[in-house]
Image (tube, helix red, strand yellow):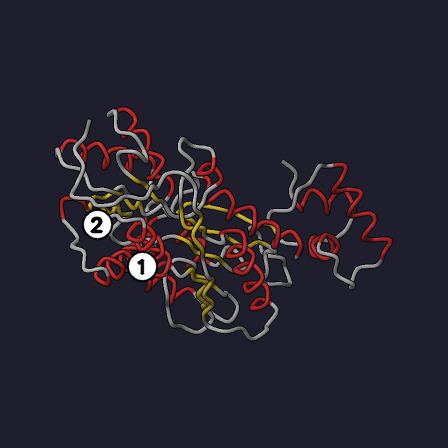
Amino acid sequence: MATIKDVAKLAGVALSTASYALNGDSKVSAKTKAKVLAAARELNYRKNGFAMDLKRSRTNTIALILTDLSGPYYSELIRSVQDVALANGYDLIACSSMGGRDSTAVRFLREKRVDGAIILAHNIHDDILVESAGERFPIIVMDRQLSSSHLVNVLVDGEQGGYLATRHLIQKGHKTIAYISGPSNSYDNALRYQGYLRAMQEAGLEEKSKWRLSGNFVREGGYSATKMMVMQGELPSAVFYGNDEMAIGGLKAFEESGISVPNDISVIGFDDIQLSEYVHPPLTTVRQPKHEAGSLAGHLLFQMLNGEAVNPSYTLTIDLVERESVRSVQAESGNQPA
């Protein structure tokens, strides 16, 4: 693979001149720039996005750090941030935070290998984010609320979303409602659960611990938690899954157990991923503004990179999407699995 040294040698210029030319610096004449670019094309040279320019501190690259790169929710978020990055002439690196303090993502933050970062990863500790954020390294956080200079929060009103989902079930006549949760250290999960509890308490309904299970925000987790709930021998009237991925796993588990949704039990999810409209039955859910949140996070990051002032926190609203996985009931005292 060709290096910038190879380009400089072929063009017959100094290494610094080649760097200036490749970065469009006005110090280099049009004739010299043309020679350097021709050499770069001949060598099929590709600029290393991690390498700092010799006279600049920017890499023209930003990072999007996610808990997990798989799943439809994350893919839509990546696309929305990438669109903003490309519009600003930047590259985007999306990476997983798996590995915690020893992960590649944390090295990006601590070593400033990119110009700024957008974080949606509950397993990167608050102290790392606060220590990493600086005037020349802005950070947008999407999954928690932190107060620190050069760090901005983009939030979705998850508490209100959990409340809307649970209240919808209650308004349909459901009195026994399970909650399948995400990771215990997830800020989003905590908010959705708080909304669930608020709606239950307002209606004078009791949460039963046996109907609060963890699915870890993944499809397999929702499937396993639902199977466990079925094996207990008594089912609630409805289940609120903390995200659509878990709800889709739950639909499969109910089908395998001979339990009809929504005839025997109602199901509601959270996120409104694309697949939720196409499962059977189509999933009633809470819609998150995924594209809007990613775009806003990207625009705010570039405003900060350009030295513009922004507010410390932004909260986006959500809404309920009614489909076919919830039915009205007259009275519920708990269902028995078929």
Closer to the camera in the image, 60 or 319: 319
On the picture, is 94 further left or further right than 125?
right
- Comparing labels 1 and 2, the label whose residue is closer to the camera: 2
On the picture, is 27 further left or further right than 16?
right
Residue at image coords 67%, 46%: 5
Closer to the camera in the image, 113 or 219: 219
Residue at image coords 72%, 37%: 43
Counting from the top left corner in percent of width and height, residue 320 is at 43, 52
Q: Amino acid at mark 1?
A: Leu
Q: Disc 2 on helix, strand or loop? A: loop
Counting from the top left corner in percent of width and height, residue 265 is at 27, 37
Counting from the top left corner in percent of width and height, residue 71 is at 43, 39
Q: Quadrant of residue 260?
A: top left
Q: Disc 1 on helix, strand or loop? A: helix
List the single residue furthest toward the front: 330
For the N terminus, the image quarter is top right
- CB atoms of marks 1 and 2 within 8 Å: no
**Vertical order, 133 against 168 (above or below):** below
Residue at image coords 28%, 52%: 170
On the picture, is 129 further left or further right than 211?
right
Q: Amino acid at mark 2?
A: Lys
Residue that label 2 marks: 175
Gap in Å between the C-alphas at discs 1 and 2?
21 Å
Q: Earlier in the sequence, mark 1 or mark 2?
A: 2
For the C terminus, the image quarter is top left
Counting from the top left corner in percent of width and height, residue 177 is at 23, 47
Residue that label 1 marks: 191
**Neighbours of disc 1 within 10 Å: few (<14), some (14-19), many (20+):** many
On the picture, is 4 further left or further right than 144?
right
